Amino acid sequence: MSSENKPQAIASDNAADSSGSVVSLSAGAPAPETPLSSVPNSKNKEKNEAKRLEKMEKFRKKQAAQNQQKAAGGSQKEKEVKAAVTKPKTKAAVTVTTPKGEKKDMSQPMAESYDPAAVEASWYEWWEKQKFFEPKTGPNGEISPKGKFVITAPPPNVTGRLHIGHALFVAIQDSLVRWNRMRGLTTLFVGGTDHAGISTQTVVEKQVWKFEKKTRHDYGREAFVNKIWEWKNEYGHTILHQMKRLGTSFDWSRERFTLDETLTRATRETFVRLFDDGIIYRSNRLVNWCHAMNTTLSNLEVKEKELTGRTLLNVPGYPSEEKFEFGVLVHFAYEVEDSDE
């Protein structure tokens, strides 16, 4: 066979069009005016377009029908749904008839849904009356042969109400106390509140300035101390009430405030003993001085900021445009009188 009659590849034996279909090309065959795949593609497009138009027409008819129903006041089904939504659900109130301090009467029918106030009512007062939270000892005050378990809860500051952090530590500690109480150990869980002197003074000062535009100096020492005691009585009572609402098994006969006379006397005695034993002592040291409170602060109450050199900073209590120099050590040298030194 001559070479003239043999098929000759133009670019390759098989070539792919833009749609991915394979088209066989050979010499002598005229190139199609349009791609072979264009015919089925155009048919698919026509079908898809027809479907889209059909869906749009159905959607328009549905919208028109809904608009007609709204104009007529809505369908009966919509009215029923609306009535069901707006109709308030009647909740049968559970009345607790148990006298305070008595064991809860469980003969009453249960509520249809959980009602925390009804479920928790009466129990804590009965627990307190039965003295379940006081340490169980023998006739002569001896502890249980199984041992003892005692926790003194960190007293919350009377600077405000309890938050979720307090609830967390109380829940954990109370769980441990209750578990050891069930095991037969002599248990004691001591609670109370902390005066948090500097923090409480700061909070009260802010409140007085916010509502009265006064400072502690406007009040005077005695009147301002009384103001702080009013704050303590209000929030101290709130904190203890919150502890009871949490179900905390404190021995309330031992509840203390850190400025109670017994604790104050014990604190003074402890510091005197530590001083006499040389464990604590007076010395000259750099301190964290608060110019606003006019007192020293512990390291825990100070926010530290590292400085690499001379820095001008604002100081609370002074105008914002006034800055002070920090990060510099200044050396002073004075001549000694009547000498060359």
Image: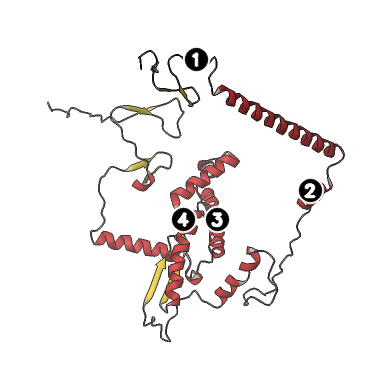
In percent of width and height, residue 55 lies at 71, 33
Q: Is residue 7 above or below residue 100?
A: above
- The tag earlier along the polypeptide, 2 or 4, is 2
- The tag earlier along the polypeptide, 1 or 4, is 1
In percent of width and height, residue 200 lies at 48, 50
Instruction: State if disc 3 and disc 4 touch (CB < 8 Å).
Output: no
In percent of width and height, residue 323 lies at 40, 27
Left or right of 257: which side holds 59? right
Amino acid type shown at disc 2: Lys
Q: In what element is the residue under mark 3? A: helix
Residue that mark 3 sits on:
235
Residue ID at (45%, 76%) = 182
Residue ID at (31%, 43%) = 287
Per the model, the C-alpha gap separating discs 4 and 3 is: 11 Å
Q: Neighbour class for label 4 at 10 Å: few (<14), some, many (≥20)?
A: many
**Viewer-side label of 3, 1:** 1
Q: Is residue 249 above or below residue 183?
A: above
The part of the image, by quadrant, that contains residue 289 is top left
Amino acid type shown at disc 1: Ala
Residue ID at (70%, 73%) = 109
Residue that mark 4 sits on:
195
- The tag earlier along the polypeptide, 4 or 3, is 4
Left or right of 73: which side holds 55? left
